Amino acid sequence: MKIKTAEFEISNSDWRKCPATSIPEYAFIGRSNVGKSSLINMLTGRKGLAKTSATPGKTLLINHFKVNGEWYIVDLPGYGYARRGKEEREKLRQIIQGYILGREQMTCLFVLVDSRHEPQKIDLEFITWLGENGVPFALVFTKLDKMGRVAGADKVEAYKRELLKSWEELPPVFMTSSEDGRGRDELLDYIQTINRSI
């Protein structure tokens, strides 16, 4: 798939105020600092489209980016940022869960995981919650450029083995790097395949 246009459309803290369209939405989520904004910029080929920040937990809104005038990339707030107060964490939980469970246009949720780390409890719990609620999702391993190819593949395989302890079948898995563009074609082809089947 060729990305001809990608533009920011709107930010909201309430899924009910998201664009009143019926076109498919592909949402991206992950723990704070997992490389979400960088991945969105890499996929669209627009460097400053999603704002990247050295400060974790910067995205506090649901951000819609229209791609090729035909579908949306949705940048969701990161979860699991420890320095947030209880009240703010609860507000974020409502924003995230409201969108994921309430937004009919959400076609697939891409869950980003930092490939360098062992499976984190918070990610595993979130993935389990998605399964329990029947949410269509795929796993996107980020920052693969930070390791050698063999080490990166080993980490991803170990993660899959961990998931297979409680999952009969794994969701689609993508290995990416925002630095070298790895996984871009595979992700965009996956989105295009879904778009054609709708």
Image (cartoon, rainbow, N blue to C red):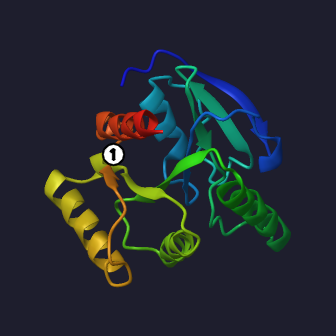
Q: Give the farthest residue toward the bottom.
A: 165
Q: Quadrant of residue 75?
A: top right
Q: Which residue is mark 1?
A: 176
Q: Quadrant of residue 97?
A: bottom right
User: Residue 108: x, y in percent?
Assistant: 51, 50
User: Residue 113: x, y in percent?
Assistant: 43, 59
Quadrant of the drawing holding the N terminus: top left
Circle 1 packing at 10 Å, graded few (<14), some (14-19), many (20+), is: many
Amino acid type, label 1? Thr
User: Residue 167: x, y in percent?
Assistant: 37, 78
Q: Nearer the viewer, residue 168 or 46?
A: 168
What residue is at 48 percent from the left and 39 percent from the top?
198
Q: Nearer the viewer, residue 139 or 18?
A: 18
Report helix, strand or loop for mark 1. Answer: loop
What residue is at 55 percent from the left and 76 percent from the top?
132
Q: Give the farthest residue toward the top.
A: 4
Q: Give the farthest residue toward the left.
A: 150
The vertical placement of 82 against 23, above or below, is: below
Q: Nearer the viewer, residue 34 or 192?
A: 192
Q: From the viewer's perspective, is 38 left or right of 2?
A: right
The vertical placement of 38 against 98, above or below, is: above
Number of marks in picture? 1
User: Residue 12: x, y in percent?
Assistant: 79, 42
What residue is at 45 percent from the left and 35 percent from the top?
195
